[in-house]
Image (tube, grey):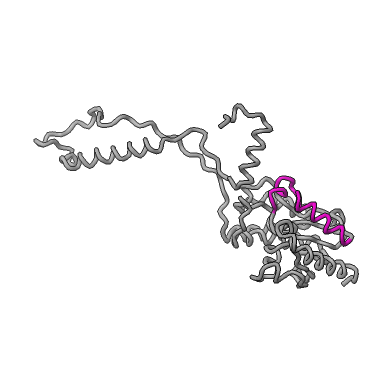
Amino acid sequence: MIPARDMTPAELAALLHFYADAGVDWLVEEEPVDQVAAFLAEREAKTVLVDAARSGVADATGAAGAPIARDRPARERPAAKPAEPQRIQAMAIPDEHAVTDARFAAESARSLSELKTALEGFAGCNLKTSARSTIFANGDPAGGIMVIGGMPSADDDREGEAFSGRAGQLFDRMLASIGLARSGIVLTTVIPWRPPGDRAPTKLEADICRPFIDRQIELAEPRLVLLMGNFTARFFFNAQETIHGLRGQWRDIASGGHAVPALACLHPLELLAAPAGKALAWRDLLDFRRRIDSGN
């Protein structure tokens, strides 16, 4: 193993990126703690106390009843080196109070820029502690089109933008096939922080993030929404079916005091894993284009 002091800054950065992509979100202590020695010292101390109790030291008297000198140097065991206090990384524990705090922060924002500031300053979700970037709505709301993914990928987390990397390249081609471009729509994700190891968010984590995505939709005021992927479709449609059972369906999702038509479609990451689904995605994109052109 190469010591960290022998690595260049670029090599260290690449190593840290690898650990983050692998889901590592805790660091070891700066100084080693000999837990074995601490355990042995604790066990020996207990043994001394037990032996003392058995010999009548509990009365502070000897066998003949004479007081035992309390200031006698202790030779029974060597003094153990006190262990350094462990430094524990502060981590937000999701609970119902975090959901309330998220709702208050989101509802207090009066514009997308204010909402972005509130989200970046929000510390009530543990997912934020291991993510590099906070993914937020990006693009032009004037186009009336909003595309929402599920959660940031490793590429999204590195680039700080939804639909990045290989999936982003495929996504751009999908948009171009129906005459759209990133610059003319709004892109975002349901979960603003990449979960460690790309695991699925827990229900409570999703509940904490919901006020922020709901408020993004409300402030962006899209005319139509395209929901990309299994998690996103289930999240907004409140359904248990997979994306293959939900795709191609138009359903209204709540946005403030009104409803917005939304269509579920396969996510580019899902298409990279199973290219056979591209025919289904193409069908959904054509349907989305027809809805745009109809003006409804």
Residue drawn at 57 percent across, 61 percent down: 96
Asked whether 17 or 185 is in front, the reply is 17
Give coordinates of residue 139: x percent, y percent.
Answer: 83, 54
Asked whether 44 or 159 is in front, the reply is 159
- Horizontal placement of 191 versus 45: left or right? right
Asked whether 236 or 215 is in front, the reply is 236
> Relative to 178, is 152 above or below?
above
Residue drawn at 61 percent across, 55 percent down: 199
Residue drawn at 67 percent across, 61 percent down: 210
Q: Quadrant of the C terminus?
A: bottom right
Q: Where is residue 20, by image quadrant?
A: top right
Give coordinates of residue 234: x percent, y percent.
Answer: 67, 67
- Horizontal placement of 217 versus 84: left or right? right
Give coordinates of residue 281: x percent, y percent.
Answer: 78, 64
Q: Where is residue 147, by image quadrant?
A: bottom right
| The magenta stretch spans residue 159 | yes
Residue 263 in view: yes
**Which residue range is magenta in the image?**
152-178
Residue farthest to the front?
276
